[in-house]
Image (tube, helix red, strand yellow):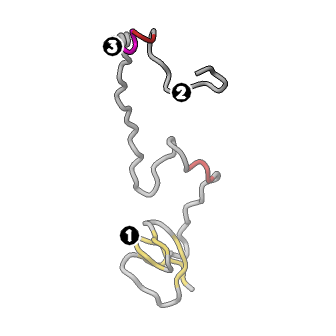
Amino acid sequence: MAKVIATQRGYFGGVLREPDDTFVVPDGAEASWFRPVRAGAVEAAAPAEPDATVGPDAPAQRGRKKPKTVMAPTAAPFADPPAPVRVENEINAATGGTQPDWIAQGADI
């Protein structure tokens, strides 16, 4: 087995590899998007805390740009609500107002 480093994005072993990823391939495997790791090369250390790379304040990783935060405009609330419109009709005048569309239990009909 040989240890290699990806120079471009590529697919190997069921995993999409990003540039600078190191992984192991069978001896003799070749591709244009990875190269063997040199014996004297020092690999980049893994981050101390895995949670440090997650969240809105995390640094951009592997050449990806940090997402830009955009604030949506806020609408001003109504200063005063419009007054309700009352419509007079004969039924309301005869019964003394709008009647409910239900009858309470135990009420005299």
Q: Secondary structure at mark 2?
A: loop
Dot 2 alpha-carbon crowd within 10 angstroms: few under 14, some 14 to 19, many 20 or more: few
In the image, residue 30 above or below residue 109:
below
Residue at 49 percent of width and 78 percent of height: 14
Task: Give the quarter of the figure containing the N terminus.
Answer: bottom right
Dot 3 alpha-carbon crowd within 10 angstroms: few under 14, some 14 to 19, many 20 or more: few
Mark 3 → mark 2, Cα distance in angstroms: 20 Å
The residue closer to the viewer here, 40 or 45, is 45
Which residue bears the numbered disc 1? 8
The three-letter code of the residue at mark 3 reads Asn
Residue at 35 percent of width and 23 percent of height: 75
Nearer mark to the viewer, of 3 and 1: 3
In the image, residue 99 above or below residue 61:
above
| N-terminal label among 3 and 1 | 1
Residue 109 lies, in percent from the top left, at 58, 22
Query: Quick check: is 88 in the magenta stretch?
Result: yes
The three-letter code of the residue at mark 2 reads Trp
Residue at 50 percent of width and 22 percent of height: 100
| N-terminal label among 2 and 1 | 1
Chain part drawn in magenta: 87-93
Nearer mark to the viewer, of 2 and 1: 2
In the image, residue 13 above or below residue 102:
below
The residue closer to the viewer here, 63 or 35, is 63
Residue 64 lies, in percent from the top left, at 40, 54
Q: Secondary structure at mark 3?
A: loop
Query: Quick check: is 86 in the magenta stretch?
Result: no
Mark 3 → mark 1, Cα distance in angstroms: 78 Å
* Tag 2 and tag 1, C-beta contact below 8 Å: no
Picture quarter containing residue 76?
top left
Which residue bears the numbered disc 2? 102
Residue 37 lies, in percent from the top left, at 50, 75
